[in-house]
Image: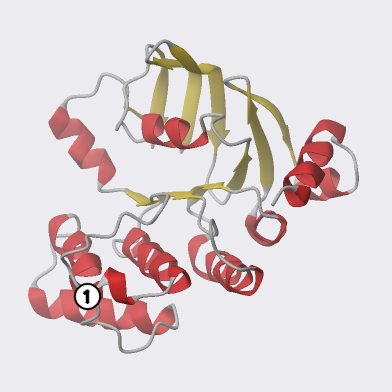
Amino acid sequence: MIRLENLKLALAGRVILDGAGLSVGPGETVALLGASGSGKSMLLRTAVGLLRPDSGRAFILDQEITGASSSDLRQVRRKIGMLFQGTALFDSMTVAENIGFVLREVAGLEKDETDRKVDELLVRLRLGPIHRQYPAELSGGMKKRVGIARALAHDPPVLFLDDPTAGLDPVTGEVIAELIAEFCTRADRATVVVTNQLPVIQRVSTRVALLADGRVTELGAPAKVFAGGHRSLRSYLEGAEARP
């Protein structure tokens, strides 16, 4: 469902991706790890066509993203949900309007159906009656949940979550991890979660990938990672936990 092949990308003379590749099938959730500045967010943005690589190919649901026309990109993006780093909610829109925007513009729902779906999502994600609040009025954890609700609103088969627990306290991070496990992972969906947080990796991932030096250098099942089967990954995880 997600296939990235030998992606290379340089920005302002700096090599970001240097042959990065990744494949994610139905029912798989890949936790993508990497140091700050390693290119994790750039890999996701390239995967959805927001950045064009210098070379390599990206496919979503067997449709090539690299080199696709604007109209083709719009069509395939209707099947993608994405939580951007920092959530990227529209500051001038209320919570209901942020979620409803996707339902109207992507799913093509009418107002009554949009309102019903927004209500349903807010209840499912345990957000309560915050329809009329603006992003500036929300806590960090609530913003993340609204961002997840927006990413899930049109029921996409492909989902990208860019650091969903970044900047949150451990308790709130656990709540977000639980929500991802409960609502984002399913048998017919391919998901990539950028994270360095052990609770997220343990709860939601079926595989773990480490992006270093512009490449996905190692893949493994979480059980093997935590059992010490992948030493470099385990060493990285322990170092990430120790960093403030």
Identify the residue at image location x=78%, y=42%. 239
Residue shown at 83% from the left, 41% from the top: 234
Looking at the image, which residue sits at the far front? 244
Residue 180, image x and y in percent? 54, 64
Residue 7 in view here? no
Q: Nearer the viewer, residue 91 or 229?
A: 91
Above or below, comparing residue 140 to residue 33 in the picture:
below
Name the spot of residue 235 as percent of width and height, x first. Answer: 83, 38
| Amino acid type indicated by mark 1 | Ala
* Apparent side of residue 235 relative to residue 95 in the rendered image (left or right): right
Measuring 65% from the left and 68% from the top, which residue is drawn there? 170
Viewer-nearest residue: 146 or 64:
146
Say which residue label 1 marks: 96
Residue ID at (49%, 62%): 184
Task: Give residue 128's position: percent from left, percent from top.
Answer: 37, 88
Task: Check the image and tell me how it is coloured.
Answer: secondary structure
Quarter-of-image position of residue 131? bottom left
Furthest-right residue in view?
Answer: 228
| Residue 36 versus residue 123 in the image, above or below | above
Residue 176 is situated, as x and y percent measured from the top left of the image, at 55, 68
| Number of numbered markers | 1
Numbered disc 1: secondary structure: helix
- Packing grade of label 1 (10 A; few <14, some 14-19, many >=20) is many
Residue 71 visible in rendering: yes
